[in-house]
Structures are given as structure tokens and as C-alpha cells.
């Protein structure tokens, strides 16, 4: 979970840098960010990558905490958690660089499947408890 949070902070930093560059090079005015209705092209991919960290990853964090709280966080859960986090790093890297759906989609799908399996693992653990 900490590794994923580190990714979120890195994406916030990247978004800040890209927005500052957009203002500095004159392609946008800083006032444009007041309502943020039209993200400049220079920072759009970073903003979207950051937004993605508050969708599926929410289920990841809740699942991790639930597994931990119920003593279900064994080796399999740990491996799944690392696979998920690595898939988010890959997904984010693709998102803020080429943003090619062809490459981004498999990374997202892997993370989706992993979170689903983590929740199945939690359900099985709770049913056996």
C-alpha cells in the first residue's frame, strides 16, 4: 500500500511540474486552473493518470486493510498486492508517456483481475473463519 501511495505522490509532483511548465511557456494562464474545466495538453495525461489512482485502487486499499484486519493477509495476498502495485506503476508510466491504449489496457486488466482475486480471497477467508 505504501508503494502505491508513493506512486500517487509522484504523480502529484509530475502534474505540478507539467502545469508549471505549461504556465511558464505561456500555453495557459494560471487562472485556468481555478475551475480546471480545460486541462492543458501538457498536463492532461498526468492528471488522468492521477485520477485513475482513486478509482480501482480504492478497492485495492480497502481489500488490503480488510485482509489485514481479519488476519487473511498471507503470502498469496502479499504477492497479489505487489502484482497490483507493479501493474499500477506500469499503467501510470504508459499513461504519462505514450498513453497508448494498446499497452495501457493490459496493465489495467492485470490490476483489475488481481484486485478481484484479492476480494475473492477475502470472501473465502471470511467464509472459512
Image (spheres, grey):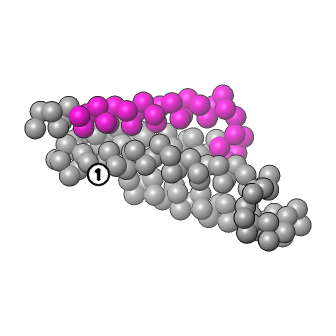
In screen coordinates, is 75 left or right of 88? Answer: left
Q: Position of residue 70 (x, y in %)?
A: 17, 47
Which residue lies at the image location 39% right of the left edge and 37% below the top edge? 115
What secondary structure is marked by label 1?
Answer: helix
Magenta segment includes 108: yes
Q: Is residue 25 visible?
A: no
In screen coordinates, is 80 left or right of 72? Answer: right
Q: Quadrant of the C terminus?
A: top left
Name the quadrant containing residue 78: top left
Which residue lies at the image location 73% right of the left edge and 61% below the top edge? 36
Q: Which residue is mark 1?
A: 65
Q: Is residue 120 above or below residue 55?
A: above
Residue stretch in magenta: 95-123
Q: Position of residue 111 (x, y in %)?
A: 46, 36
Q: Judge the density around disc 1: few (<14), some (14-19), many (≥20) Cα neighbours within 10 Å.
A: some
Magenta segment includes 81: no
Amino acid at each position: 500500500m505504501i508503494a502505491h501511495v508513493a506512486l500517487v505522490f509522484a504523480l502529484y509532483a509530475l502534474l505540478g511540474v507539467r502545469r508549471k511548465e505549461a504556465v511558464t511557456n505561456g500555453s495557459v494562464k494560471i487562472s485556468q486552473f481555478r475551475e480546471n474545466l480545460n486541462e492543458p495538453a501538457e498536463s492532461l495525461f498526468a492528471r488522468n493518470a492521477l485520477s485513475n489512482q482513486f478509482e480501482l485502487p480504492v478497492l485495492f486499499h480497502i481489500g488490503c486493510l480488510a485482509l489485514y484486519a481479519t488476519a487473511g493477509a498471507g503470502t498469496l495476498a502479499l504477492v497479489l498486492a505487489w502484482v497490483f502495485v507493479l501493474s499500477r506503476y506500469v499503467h501510470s508510466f504508459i499513461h504519462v508517456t505514450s498513453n497508448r491504449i494498446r499497452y495501457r489496457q493490459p496493465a489495467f486488466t492485470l490490476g483489475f483481475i488481481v484486485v478481484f482475486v484479492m476480494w475473492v480471497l477475502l470472501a473465502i477467508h471470511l467464509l472459512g473463519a
